[in-house]
Amino acid sequence: MRRIRRIRYKLARAADDFAQFTVDVIYDRRHGRGAEVMANFLYGLSFVFSAIVQSRLRLYENRILRNKPLGCLVVVVGNLTVGGTGKTPVVEKLARTLNERGRKVAILSRGYKSKKEPLPKKLWRKLSHGEEAPPKIVSNGEAVLLDSEEAGDEPYMLARNLPGVVVLCDKNRVKAGSYAIRRFGCDTLILDDGFQYLPLKGRLNLLLVDTTNPFGNQHLLPRGILREPIKHLSRANYIFLTKSDGTRDETLLEQIREHNADAEIIECAHRPQHLQAVHGDERLPLEALQGAKIGAFSGIASPESFESMLRSFGAEIRYNQRFLDHHRFTRYEIERLYRKAGQAELDMIVTTEKDAVRLFKDIEAPVPIYYLRLEIDILSGEEDFEGATERICGPRTQAS
């Protein structure tokens, strides 16, 4: 049995290695003949992707395809690029602030890589009831009802960290928004990762730009990391410059202003708060990393920033493992990871909050395991963030 699991693991690793190679080419991390061939192939596909993206946007702009109003405020939080902009802490801060100011908030997520409904069950419901499944209720505002496998990593994290906020998952965000209004009486919808979701128009569009890698190599998918052209910065009301170190990047600001002269720009950093035990309530101050011999692993778009953050607090990373973004761990992978970590004589293992929700509670680590808790910290433009919140909460704001 163990031999079969090992074979499966090797096949999965081979597939992951190829996927990682492709990702590295997209991010221009790989060089050489093989990388050049792959880059040229992806470059050709980018033209096709660009044509589809821009044609779709024009169809909505010219009202050939129509977005559907829900009679409720819709706030869009998204980005022009794939992965790594630090969107979840921004959504969390916005939802918490609105909730504290008396809005009835629902976060609408597509539930990326969440567990799908089995096909036989889906067909049976269609045949017997003639209707679509309702959105997944990750949180009803009072309790978290689904785990990360059912809901997806980020919706589960948001539900866990935001009591009082409804969190729903569905690819059809119009249906999910209507359900949030009808079932829970929500008056404010936050469309998580919704900048490219055109069927539901936002009253306010909050666009995130990662200061450490704003637009990649400026190519569209799949050659680069752009979901749509940089000129579409023009659609944003507020632009959040994330992962800032406080240094003003005039070149980036000029590029943004070239395409959007009016948007408010808010600069923010993702600040580590503490180390939180993965299985338990224990918290450690960040000073515990000073001189600690640690193991680190992550399945995020930008593992370098996570690892660099750990080292900046004085940690010595003796064992490190990277997985693809949103990677769903297998039991064998975690057992193997813990076994190798145990051989490295570590003081602790540290991962990200997003990865921590995918770990198995019944597999015991050889040393204490924690995740790094991050929160958003506004460096400049605080009055603009407050202004955005006031626009949503204020009596002058009308439904979208």
Image (cartoon, rainbow, N blue to C red):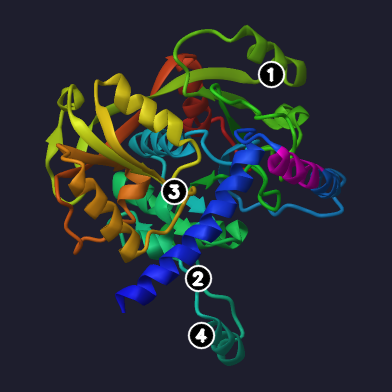
User: Nearer the viewer's eye, disc 1 or disc 3?
Assistant: 3
Residue under the image location 52 percent in, 59 percent down: 14
Crowdedness of circle 2 by 10 Å Cα count: few (<14), some, many (20+)? Answer: few
- Which residue is disc 1 drawn over? 256
- Which residue is disc 4 drawn over? 121
Which element is circle 3 on?
loop
Task: Give the distance between the C-alpha atoms of the residues marked 3 and 2, in whole angstroms.
Answer: 22 Å
User: Would you say the residues marked 1 and 4 are in contact, meaning their CB atoms lie under 8 Å apart?
Assistant: no
Task: Give the distance between the C-alpha atoms of the residues marked 2 and 4, in whole angstroms.
Answer: 11 Å
> Mark 3 is on which residue type?
Phe
Tell me how many marks there are: 4
Question: Which numbered circle lies on residue 116?
Answer: 2
Magenta stretch: dominant secondary structure: helix
Location of residue 287 with respect to 304 vertically, above or below: above
> Mark 1 is on which residue type?
Ile
**First in residue order: circle 3 vs circle 2:** 2
> Mark 2 is on which residue type?
Lys
In this view, the residue in front, 55 or 8, is 8
Which element is circle 1 on?
helix
Task: Give the distance between the C-alpha atoms of the residues marked 3 and 4, in whole angstroms.
Answer: 32 Å
Crowdedness of circle 1 by 10 Å Cα count: few (<14), some, many (20+)? Answer: many
In reply to whether residue 131 is colored magenta, the answer given is no
